[in-house]
């Protein structure tokens, strides 16, 4: 029998085994360190920047939403919106901006659109990332991410609609964490779109389209998004009532919860955190199974030694703890080192990735308990659980079975009767049947890898195909939008371009159970050179063509009736599907110019004034093809 006073000799085997197989354990430890370190850095960076975003809502006075009016509202209208009948208690702030043309390399050519705000202390403030805020009329502060993409530095001079400004600072507006020019844009554009801050005098130097945008903040903060949506709907109804009474048309309305420029970055960072946690757990389980298989083979190889130890008085628990020690020890060391790297090296790597993608404010690194639990506690627990199950299963044998190396517990199964084929055919088939579980796992693994490989290999070709054929999917080379179809003298706006064609456009919405989607409704002339629909002139009132994506997404067919709603009014339109227009990749409706729901060019464009043309045309998106 074993003398309990003698020091356990199994403890001496751990450093000896570590020294003997140090290459294997080093590779596994490095893999764990890199995985845990990167995920830990992601959690720390994510948590720190998310906290900065949450704190920034109050620190930088983030709006609860904004709306745009056709004309500047006087104080009576503002007071009526804030305190009028059925009004939601809010405070309304002026947040005007001008849409200008940016020329950051001063070559006389447009490099994109810049949205210029006047410096304010009331609403939608900016975090200064580098340099200083503008103090004179010739100074400007621009978005940091746009500056990085365009190669603009503090001290450079840029041209804004032919007015020269010196860049004194790089900023991050709290309401532009991503540079979405429109709320309907699927993706932001940090290269061709920019936001900027100038002084009051600097703002008056510009002559571009002035947008009368007003931001609001609720007197009582909503408890959740459901309550926020309810308050937003109530506020919009009250706002519509007041604007109609005061004869001031509502051009745009966007609550904060529906604003991608505010929510896209934080939503994406939240999904990154979830994805990182799942990836870490999967990798830990895989490594745990690798350890389990290794330990299982070690137990089989050392079965006689184990049998002798068991016969000498060593318990199953002692042997289980011994074989558990190495994987748990390696995981704990890797978790400690990985977390140290996560809070230092990898955190900075993840932060730089986020700053390269989003226009986020400055942050401070904070302790993240979730990072410790998910990158230290859970990996150690998973490693312990997987190996414990395997080792306990292996230790169910008797000492005699260990001594005899009789470690198989499978009972003899009844032989499957095979057809009277040739011997080698039956032999191959029997081998396949005996290893079906292994083949199933192998098939699943190869299938998963091939699917991922096909996606990786096919994605560049898919994008290249879209890039090569994108021009063929456009109606015309240029499309221009006008805010009004009349000039300052009340005359209809015309163009000297002979092949220009007038059309109408209206933005309606398709109401869904979970999400409303914007639909572009085009009123097209029956002899259009750009949008060719042969029987357009024969369409009856309320008969329309739908784009192919519209048909496929909503599972529609010719003859169906669809209902579309006005975005900011209590109006609905019903259309009967008369056909399908193939040359369009958007959710769109096409009707005859005569029966269009729009009586003239669309009045909700972001662009208002004439731009310098590339070839003599107006520079916008609607009204002329």
Image: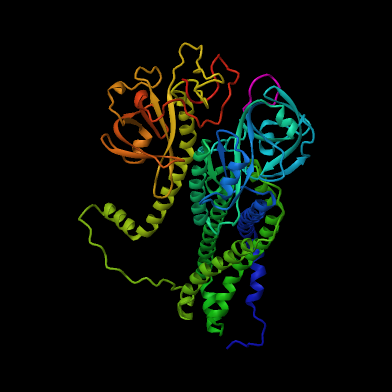
Q: 335 and 432: which one is in front?
A: 335
**Residue 47, position in %: x, y?**
64, 56
| 383 relative to 196 in the view: left or right | left
For the record, the magenta segment spans 103-112
Residue 28 visible somewhere in the drawing: yes
Q: 230 and 263: which one is in front?
A: 230
| 418 relative to 170 in the view: left or right | left
**Residue 85, position in %: x, y?**
52, 50
Residue 301 visible somewhere in the drawing: no
Count of numbered circles on the image: 0
**Residue 526, position in %: x, y?**
34, 19
As displayed, is residue 590 above or below residue 530?
A: below
Query: At x 60% / y 35%, what residue is drawn?
Result: 72
- In the picture, the quarter occupied by the N terminus is bottom right
The way the protein has been coloured in the rendering is rainbow
**Residue 595, position in %: x, y?**
34, 27
As displayed, is residue 520 above or below residue 317?
A: above
As displayed, is residue 29 above or below residue 586?
A: below
| Residue 120 lies in quadrant | top right
Q: Main secondary structure of the magenta part?
A: loop
As displayed, is residue 312 above or below residue 542?
A: below
| 585 relative to 27 in the view: left or right | left
| Residue 522 lies in quadrant | top left
| 215 relative to 396 in the view: left or right | right
Query: At x 64% / y 72%, what residue is drawn?
Result: 13
Q: Is residue 221 magenta?
A: no
Q: 430 and 563: which one is in front?
A: 563
């Amino acid at each position: 029998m074993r003398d309990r006073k003698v020091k356990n000799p199994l403890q001496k085997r751990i450093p000896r085994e570590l020294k003997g197989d140090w290459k294997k354990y080093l590779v596994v430890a490095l893999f764990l360190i890199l995985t845990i370190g990167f995920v830990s850095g992601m959690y720390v960076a994510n948590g720190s920047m998310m906290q900065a975003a949450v704190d920034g809502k109050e620190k930088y006075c983030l709006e609860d939403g904004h709306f745009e009016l056709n004309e500047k509202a006087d104080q009576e209208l503002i007071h009526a919106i804030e305190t009028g009948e059925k009004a939601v208690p809010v405070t309304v702030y002026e947040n005007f901006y001008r849409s200008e043309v940016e020329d950051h390399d001063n070559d006389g050519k447009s490099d994109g659109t810049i949205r210029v705000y006047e410096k304010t202390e009331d609403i939608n403030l900016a975090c200064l990332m580098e340099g200083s805020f503008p103090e004179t009329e010739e100074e400007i502060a621009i978005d940091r991410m746009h500056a990085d993409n365009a190669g603009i530095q503090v001290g450079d001079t840029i041209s804004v609609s032919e007015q020269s400004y010196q860049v004194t600072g790089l900023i991050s507006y709290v309401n532009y964490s991503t540079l979405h020019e429109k709320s309907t844009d699927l993706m932001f554009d940090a290269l061709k779109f920019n936001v900027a801050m100038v002084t009051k005098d600097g703002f008056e130097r510009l002559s571009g389209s002035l947008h009368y945008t007003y931001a609001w903040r609720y007197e009582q903060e909503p408890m959740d998004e459901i309550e926020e949506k309810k308050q937003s709907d109530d506020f919009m109804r009250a706002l519509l009532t007041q604007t109609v009474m005061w004869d001031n048309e509502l051009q745009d309305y966007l609550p904060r919860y529906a604003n991608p420029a505010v929510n896209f970055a934080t939503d994406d960072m939240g999904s990154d955190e979830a994805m990182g946690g799942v990836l870490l757990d999967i990798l830990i389980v895989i490594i745990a199974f690798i350890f389990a298989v290794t330990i299982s083979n070690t137990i089989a190889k050392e079965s006689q030694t184990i049998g002798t130890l068991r016969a000498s008085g060593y318990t199953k628990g002692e042997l289980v703890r011994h074989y558990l020690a190495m994987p748990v020890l390696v995981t704990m060391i890797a978790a400690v080192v990985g977390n140290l790297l996560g809070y230092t090296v990898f955190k900075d790597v993840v932060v730089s990735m986020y700053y390269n993608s989003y226009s986020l404010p400055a942050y401070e690194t904070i302790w993240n308990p979730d990072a410790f639990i998910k990158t230290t506690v859970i990996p150690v627990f998973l490693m312990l659980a997987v190996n414990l199950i395997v080792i306990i299963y292996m230790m169910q044998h008797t000492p005699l079975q260990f001594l005899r190396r009789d470690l198989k517990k499978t009972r003899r199964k009844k032989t499957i009767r095979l057809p009277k084929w040739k011997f080698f055919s039956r032999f191959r088939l029997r081998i396949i049947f005996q290893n079906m579980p292994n083949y199933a796992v192998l098939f699943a693994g190869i299938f998963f890898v091939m699917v991922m490989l096909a996606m990786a290999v096919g994605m560049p070709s898919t994008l290249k195909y879209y890039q090569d054929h994108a021009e063929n999917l456009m109606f015309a080379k240029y499309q221009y939008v006008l805010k009004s179809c009349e000039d300052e003298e009340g005359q209809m706006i015309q163009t000297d371009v002979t092949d220009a064609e007038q059309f109408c456009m209206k933005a309606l919405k398709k109401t869904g159970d979970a999400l409303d989607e914007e639909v572009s409704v085009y009123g097209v002339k029956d002899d259009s050179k750009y949008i060719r629909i042969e029987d357009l002139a024969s369409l009856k009132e309320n008969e329309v063509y739908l784009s192919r994506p519209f048909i496929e997404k909503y599972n529609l067919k010719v003859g169906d009736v669809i209902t579309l709603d006005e975005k900011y009014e209590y109006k609905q339109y019903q259309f009967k599907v008369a056909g399908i227009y193939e040359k369009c990749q958007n959710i769109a409706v096409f009707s005859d110019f005569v029966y269009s729901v729009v009586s003239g060019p669309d009045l909700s464009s972001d662009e208002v004034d004439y731009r310098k043309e590339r070839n003599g045309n107006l520079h916008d998106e609607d009204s002329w093809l």
